[in-house]
Image (cartoon, rainbow, N blue to C red):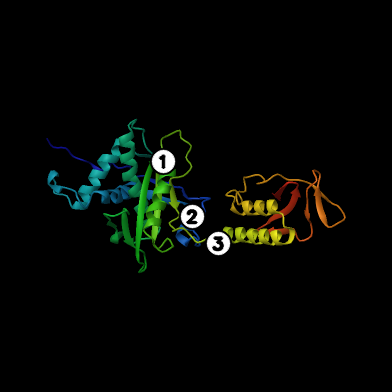
Amino acid sequence: MLVTVDTSSIPAEPFDVVARKNATNRIARRCPVTDPNWLTTLLADGCALQLEDVILQAGRHFSDRVNRQIFTSNPSRRQAATAIAWTILSLVAPSVTSSQLFVSDPLDGDIKGLCSEVLGIGMALEILRKCAVIDGRTIAKLAGSFDYEANGRDGGGRIKIEAKGTFNDASTSAHRTSIWKKINNASLPRGYDSAIGIITSLWTVGQVRDFDVEICDPERQPENHLEAAVREIICFYARRFDESAAIPEGTDLLFSVAKNPRLFDKRSGPILPQATYQSDGLGLCRSSGGAFGSHEGCQSHLSSRAFEIRRNSPLSWVSIL
């Protein structure tokens, strides 16, 4: 039985890609370097692609192992791989409408996962080639933890590439975690010229389309000493407070503030109860409940936070304003 795969049936209309950067609030996953020009341009202007070029890149997923003997027309390895990629992606019937790429829902989780993976690879590689990040002639599939690597343009070194795909943004969060772990565990130098993670989402008609591709921060865990420094300063004042006031409860509470995991959480309320105070004329601060402590010298501004030390026998507390 002769079966022909017609790659000329791939939609010819160009489509626009909306890109975003993973705006993580996790310091360990935040890129500490300035965005390169290609990324700034991609985020601002997006990118126009041809589905034929994307599927050509997607075929790299199979090109190393394609069995050309099953084809009667004696295609090249690249042509055979492209035909396989198009055969798979045709399961979700990709089409271009109003300069946007859409797919049909196959109502099958396995097909969604397979097509998302294949098209995600094609989109990632083609975007990096189109944005002149990599030399498309040097793309090579890897057998290790990363999907691909390629030379950077203009004599750049080898860049590791991790490509992920999702369906209607269903598994983006899990993909971010996977990409971060892979790049972090590889102990690569920082910078987009070392490793890049890209997540592509396929979209069906009627869904709220937030993005087409997301560029993930490809960094190892940065050394951020600010929080540790602030906590250390609080401990310093706790020790000074203990030496000058000799109020163990207040000292313990200062140390508890320094160790509190919510100290730098802007969404969190005060770590400890707040109290009002008034001077008793003796240089002490007295709260409405009888709290007192040394007012002078007991206020310090640490990383835009003020700490006031008060005592309410037999307890002491620190209020973060």
Q: CA distance from mark 2 to mark 1?
A: 21 Å
Please name the amino acid that badge 1 sits on.
Ser
Marks 3/1 in contact by CB < 8 Å: the verdict is: no
The amino acid beneath tag 3 is His
Mark 1 nearby-residue class (10 Å; few <14, some 14–19, many ≥20): some
User: Mark 2, residues whose alpha carbon is within 10 Å: few (<14), some, or many (≥20)?
Assistant: some
Q: Earlier in the sequence, mark 3 or mark 2?
A: 2
Q: Circle 3 sits on which residue?
A: 225
Residue 89 falls in which quadrant of the image? top left
Determine crowd level at label 3: few under 14, some 14-19, many 20+ residues with C-alpha closer than 10 A. few
* Residue position for label 2: 28
Which residue is disc 1 drawn over?
171
Q: Earlier in the sequence, mark 2 or mark 1?
A: 2
Q: Nearer the viewer, mark 3 or mark 2?
A: 3
Q: Which of label 3 and label 1 is nearer to you?
A: 3
Q: Nearer the viewer, residue 141 or 68?
A: 141
